[in-house]
Image: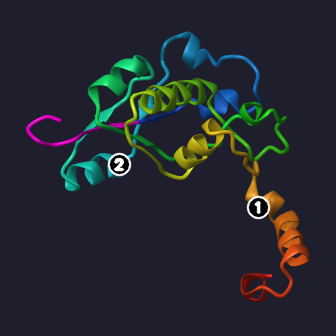
Amino acid sequence: MILGKPVICISNTSDNTVAYNDGVGVSENVKLGLRRIVSPSAYIRAVDLAGGIPVLTGETSAEEYAEMCDGLILSGGEDLNPAMLGEEKLNDSVKWDDIRDEYEMKLFKAFMAKGKPIFGICRGFQMVNVACGGTLYQDLKIDYFYIHLLLYNLLPSSLSCKNYC
């Protein structure tokens, strides 16, 4: 807390997702140190409007952020690397950033170890799920047909199936 306000750590995205979408190698931007770390201003404004002090991460010092901050927001963005789930990439729509995946897992573990709150938004919630041993569908648009059939076969008389199947 600073001046009675909670300090909230916000994870960032980068401009380098495309460098890892095939899971091969490191892009020239990363080799040259040109990786840009970015964050939508909506996260910063939301924390500020809620009475907190936003702090953006820099892909280093996960333990120090966990010590310094009162909570963590794992922000939205691209997909998680399917390798985190022990899977291969199923289609070209799946794009990820290995550096971000690795760093956010460190952030998650550091904040969990300190018993501090973690809030996941979209991709961030997926990270929490995977970090806790959960699974994901790589692409709901592609997997939707399978999910649709699964719901219909398992729950043909349920209210949810009547409304959505």
Q: Residue at x 49, y 51 (%)?
A: 121
Q: Nearer the viewer, residue 38 or 130?
A: 130
Question: What is the x, y in percent for residue 118?
Answer: 43, 42
Amino acid carrying mark 1 in the image: Lys
Using the numbered discs, state the Cα–Cα distance from disc 1 to disc 2 in whole angstroms: 26 Å
**Secondary structure category for the residue under label 1:** helix
Q: Nearer the viewer, residue 25 or 70?
A: 70
Amino acid carrying mark 2 in the image: Tyr
Q: Quadrant of residue 31?
A: top right
Q: Residue at x 76, y 51 (%)?
A: 137
Q: Residue at x 29, y 31 (%)?
A: 69
**Secondary structure category for the residue under label 2:** helix
Q: Residues within 10 Å of mark 1 (few under 14, many from 20)?
A: few
Against 53, is 153 above or below? below
Q: Which residue is mark 2?
A: 43
Please report the bounds of the magenta region as a residue range: 1-10
Using the image, tell me which numbered label, if any, was put on residue 141. 1
Q: Nearer the viewer, residue 40 or 145?
A: 145
**Label 1 or label 2, whichever comes before in sequence order:** 2
Question: What is the x, y in percent for residue 147?
Answer: 82, 66
